[in-house]
Image (spheres, rainbow, N blue to C red):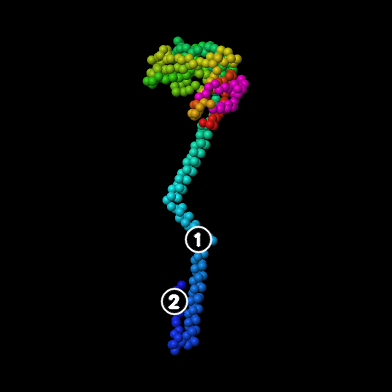
Amino acid sequence: MALPSSTITKIPNNEPDAVPSLWNLRYEEIDQNFSYLEQHRSQMRSELDAAKGGKASVGERLDEMSTQLQSLSPDYQDDLSATAMFAMDQAALANRSVQSLKEQMQQEGEVTIRNRGVVTGCAVTRSTTAARNLNLENGIAFMNGRIFSAPARENAASVPTNTSNSAVTVHAFLYFHEGSQSMRLSVTAIGDDVPAHGIHIYNITIPGNSTDETDPSLDYVTLTNVRRIEPEFPANLNSPRTETISIKDLRDSDYRIDIDLVSAVGEPCRSEQVEVVSRATNGFTLQLATGADDIVVRWRVSKLDN
């Protein structure tokens, strides 16, 4: 807004023109300047209110602006970055602690322990009447908490040929034959494990290039006896079944082990019949004091001060 008149015309004392009409003109100039000043003061007050930005005074607003400007300083930014990094490190540490609690300080799992073997007999020998066959000696085996007869049988199972250049190992096992209500002998195929329904009794090592033509009598085949023999089953177990369970490494072996017996097949099984007989920082061993079979055990390892 421009000032209407920067000066007010002076009325000379001795000029003939200094008549009352000239005073009216000067009064108008004075009124215009007062009006301008009033409008200018209103505008300044409005601009001042805007400058305060909602604060009680301009000084308070300046203090706020100073704080905001300070927050953008390099030192403030460095402090902010350090604080953010520290917070992220603490969050990562907390996450690792939770992960460690879930995966290491408290570990748990489930295992099925098969409790099977031979009471007497059940030896395996090479057949003398058929190529690459095995004979089963008469005996008694136990499985599912019960005992079963295993009648002698010639040429009870055959050993597979091995046409590769390297030796391989297969497994001889007993299985329950529904038709005869007794045990029969079988041999796994190359690369297979003993099936869940079997009783492992022998390992058979077959050399390379072993066939009906090169070794019909199994002279170069090695039979390794792995029978678990329990002559007093189920009253007394001379070689109780054990199961070693691996865990993630702990700092010490003084951890707690909780055992939950889920199910068992055959004779009754109580929780106290599943014993912890040894422990190390990377695992522990359970031992059965029962004739039951297919025992499902849930376990938990806890070491909260690891």
- Nearer-the-camera pick, 83 or 299: 83
Residue furthest to the front = 13
- Nearer-the-camera pick, 297 or 53: 53
Per the image, the residue denoted by label 1 is 59
Measured from the top left, where is residue 171 in percent x and y? 47, 19
Tell me, yes or no, if residue 70 can be seen here: yes
Measured from the top left, where is residue 183 in percent x and y? 54, 16
Figure quadrant of residue 118: top right
Measured from the top left, where is residue 272 in percent x and y? 60, 22
- Nearer-the-camera pick, 30 or 195: 30
- Nearer-the-camera pick, 290 or 185: 290
Q: CA distance from mark 2 to mark 1?
A: 33 Å
Whether tag 2 and tag 1 are in contact, CB under 8 A, the answer is: no
- Looking at the image, residue 21 lies above or below residue 218: below
Dominant SS type (magenta): strand
| Label 1, residues with CA under 10 Å away: few <14, some 14-19, many ≥20 | few
Measured from the top left, where is residue 107 in percent x and y? 53, 30
Per the image, the residue denoted by label 2 is 6
Residue 275 falls inside the magenta stretch: yes
SS class, disc 1: helix
Q: Which residues are magenta?
A: 255-280
Q: Amino acid at mark 1?
A: Gly
- Name the N-terminal-most of marks 2 and 1: 2
The residue under the point 51% across, 27% down is 252
